[in-house]
Each structure stands twice: as C-alpha cells, then as structure tokens.
Image (cartoon, grey):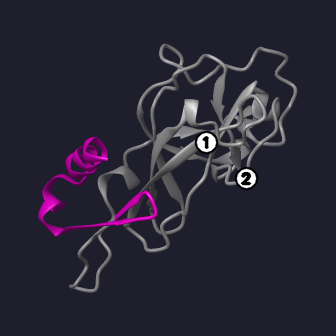
C-alpha cells in the first residue's frame, strides 16, 4: 500500500499537500481537498492511454488465442480510459474463463470513487482454476473519478494468460 501511496502522491504533483488519505476495507481512498468549492481534477484525468479495443468486453469470446494479453512486453503501466467498443470501465463482476478472450480474465473487485477528483486503491481479481478471485493473481488497481468517466492505473500482469476485462 505504501508503494501505491507514493505513486498517487507523484501523480497528484503540486496538489500533494491537499491529499487526504483513509484506509477502508483494504482500499486506500484519497481525494483532493476542495474546500474552495471548485473541483480540481488530477493530472490523470487529462493524461491517459485510451483503449477502445472491443475484444476487452466481458461479452467478447471469439479471440481463439489471438487477443493480446496484459503481461510485460505486451502491456504498458499507466492510466487507462476505456472508450468506444471497449466499454467505459473495468468489469465489476467475475467474468467466465474465455470472456474478453482470456483464459484468466481479470476484473475489479472493489468500489469505484463517487466524488469527482477522488481516487481509490482496490483489488483486481482473476478468475483462475475455479476461483473467482484467485489470491495467486491479485492485482492492485487505482481508480480515479474524472467527473463523468473513470481512469484506471493498471500494470502488466504476472501471467501471459491474464487480460483485463471491461464493460459499459
């Protein structure tokens, strides 16, 4: 959790002194102090990687082993915004094996931030070997509410069979 706090502090840059941190249910919840009644969105709300790949949808099952996985070498660490055919957010329900073209589909097992400008740290789960949230493949994910859409801080996965699934 300390590592993700440092990542968060880095991404909020000049607003670091206005960050508020709380830890609830294995999640770090933080937001900018907006006591002046104006919402200042963090940098990741304007600087992110757009992903519109429709094969990421939880309903997509036709990859036949040809969809790229999210492991090192195929996936870049960073803030992602899902748009268009890819949906608008990470899946929040456990996908079945084969969904979004993955033998080990990943999904977000946490709460999204409800306040614009706030970010939560939550757990990404992987459906593996009959376990909907296999502890062997736990993934730390950051989610920021950008006042109308979400961005997700994602990292390459530890297995070449894991893929982040999305939904609308």
The residue lying at 42 percent from left, 71 percent from top is: 116
The residue lying at 37 percent from left, 67 percent from top is: 117
Q: Which of disc 2 and disc 1 is earlier in sequence?
A: 2
**Of residues 104 and 67, the one drawn nearer to the viewer in this rendering:** 104
Label placed on residue 104? none
Q: Is residue 63 above or below residue 45?
A: above
Residue 7 in the image: state x and y as whole percent: 27, 44
With 153 as the anchor, is 159 left or right in this view? right
Q: Residues within 10 Å of mark 2 (few under 14, many from 20)?
A: some
Q: Secondary structure at mark 1?
A: strand
With 51 as the anchor, is 168 left or right in this view? right
Q: Which residues are magenta?
A: 1-29
Residue 23 in the image: state x and y as whole percent: 35, 64
Residue 119 in the image: state x and y as whole percent: 39, 60
What residue would you read off at disc 1?
Answer: 125
With 9 as the anchor, is 166 left or right in this view? right
Which quadrant of the rendered structure holds the C terminus?
bottom right
Residue 132 in the image: state x and y as whole percent: 72, 42
Q: Quadrant of residue 74?
A: top right
The residue lying at 76 percent from left, 24 percent from top is: 103
Q: CA distance from mark 1 to mark 2?
A: 10 Å
Q: Quadrant of residue 30?
A: bottom left
Reply yes or no: does residue 98 show up in magenta: no
**Of residues 11 and 85, the one drawn nearer to the viewer in this rendering:** 11
Label placed on residue 93? 2
């Amino acid at each position: 959790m300390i590592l993700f706090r440092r990542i968060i502090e880095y991404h909020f840059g000049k607003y670091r002194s206005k960050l508020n941190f709380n830890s609830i249910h294995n999640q770090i919840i933080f937001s900018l102090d907006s006591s002046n009644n104006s919402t200042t969105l963090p940098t990741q709300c304007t600087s992110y990687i757009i992903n519109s790949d429709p094969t990421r949808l939880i309903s997509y099952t036709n990859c036949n082993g040809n969809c790229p996985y999210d492991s090192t070498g195929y996936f870049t660490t960073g803030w992602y915004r899902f748009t268009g055919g890819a949906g608008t957010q990470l899946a929040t329900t456990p996908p079945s094996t084969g969904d979004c073209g993955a033998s080990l589909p990943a999904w977000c097992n946490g709460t999204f931030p409800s306040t614009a400008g706030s970010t939560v740290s939550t757990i990404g789960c992987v459906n593996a070997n009959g376990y909907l949230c296999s502890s062997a493949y736990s993934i730390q994910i950051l989610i920021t509410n950008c006042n109308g859409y979400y961005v997700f801080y994602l990292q390459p996965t530890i297995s070449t069979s894991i893929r982040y699934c999305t939904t609308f």
